[in-house]
Image (cartoon, rainbow, N blue to C red):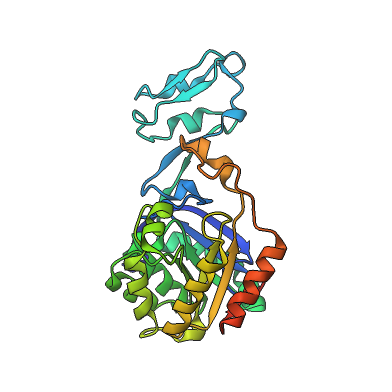
Amino acid sequence: MTGKTTGQVFNIQRYSIHDGAGIRTLVFLKGCPFRCLWCSNPESQKAGPELGYIESRCVGAVSCGAPCVAVCAAGALSLNAEDRAVVDRQGCDVCGKCAGACRKGALKVVGREMMVDEVMAEVEKDRAFYRRSGGGMTVGGGEPLAQPEFTAVLLKAAQDAFLHTALETCGHAPWRHLEAVLRHVDQLQFDLKHPDPVRHRELTGQSNELALSNLERVLSVKAPGDVIIRFPVVPGYTGEIEDIQDMARFVVRLGFTQVELVPYHMLGASKYAQYGMVYRLDGCVPPSETVMAGLRRTVEDLGLAEMTGRI
């Protein structure tokens, strides 16, 4: 049964107003082929579950007795000089026993296998809000196309339930996967990171050639009004006016009509240490509203409707 199809989900966020029309439920899936320097969801990058550790919440073995260390059969938890937990990422098998033993919430497992029916049960809780606001369900990540079957089945289930559907994607996947998913998408939000393939690889770890190739084929399936091309504005990396102009001219040439300029923010920076990762944009600051206003005028002058701030 398609409702029993399973996928790796790391969050279901209700009452979202920034990921499609109206009030929405945003389903975050695990796994992504990109490693964008500015990624605000580092916990989404790996395909499977992983252990998160918020060191500031650890009260130390003297206060709690360190039950997390005691239950770790893999020996991946130890204590440092301050009697606080230390995670051996290589040795951890993500069994979750330590998270269950931690009474302060310092340890948590992020990502779990869910059936389509389970996800839809959560999404259905806010049907009244979707109806009043014109909202629905948005599938993001991570990269949803890293789980193409689950994504397609989940979106179809939402459409069968007469809910508006949206997909957030970087487009880095085989065309057959994107095409199959698009059949069940009412609104596509397609992220373009940088127009130059070499610079794109430096910023994300991958070339943009596959994404651009897929983008050239999107309008064979979707109408221009059903697609929003999204550009990140990261000062010093993707926020130069020449970058925005190049991307805008490219999408206009393909026949697209709508863009969303997405300003860089630092909301995910603190999460990197929780997963043993290093945030590489330390010191980068969000673009000013003056800069954003100028870039909006730039894309509008090139014939694109800028969708920032819509609900």
Q: Quadrant of the N terminus?
A: bottom left
Q: Position of residue 272 (x, y in %)?
A: 51, 40
| Residue shown at the point (43%, 35%) measured from the top left | 96
Q: Position of residue 48 (x, y in %)?
A: 36, 46
Which one is nearer the viewer's eye here, 222 or 126? Answer: 222
Name the outermost residue toward the right: 290
| Residue shown at the point (37%, 52%) measured from the top left | 205
Q: Quadrant of the C terminus?
A: bottom right
**Relative to 97, residue 44 above or below:** below
Question: How many marks overall?
Answer: 0
Q: Quadrant of residue 292?
A: bottom right
| Residue shown at the point (54%, 80%) measured from the top left | 258
Q: Position of residue 244 (x, y in %)?
A: 53, 69
Q: Position of residue 80 (x, y in %)?
A: 50, 16
In the image: residue 125, left or right of residue 205? right
Which one is nearer the viewer's eye here, 139 or 188? Answer: 188
**Relative to 228, residue 144 above or below:** above
In the image: residue 156, left or right of residue 290? left
In the image: residue 204, left or right of residue 121? left
Q: Quadrant of residue 63?
A: top right
* Residue 281 appearing in the image: yes
* Residue 103 appearing in the image: no
**Relative to 267, residue 288 above or below:** below
| Residue shown at the point (51%, 85%) measured from the top left | 225
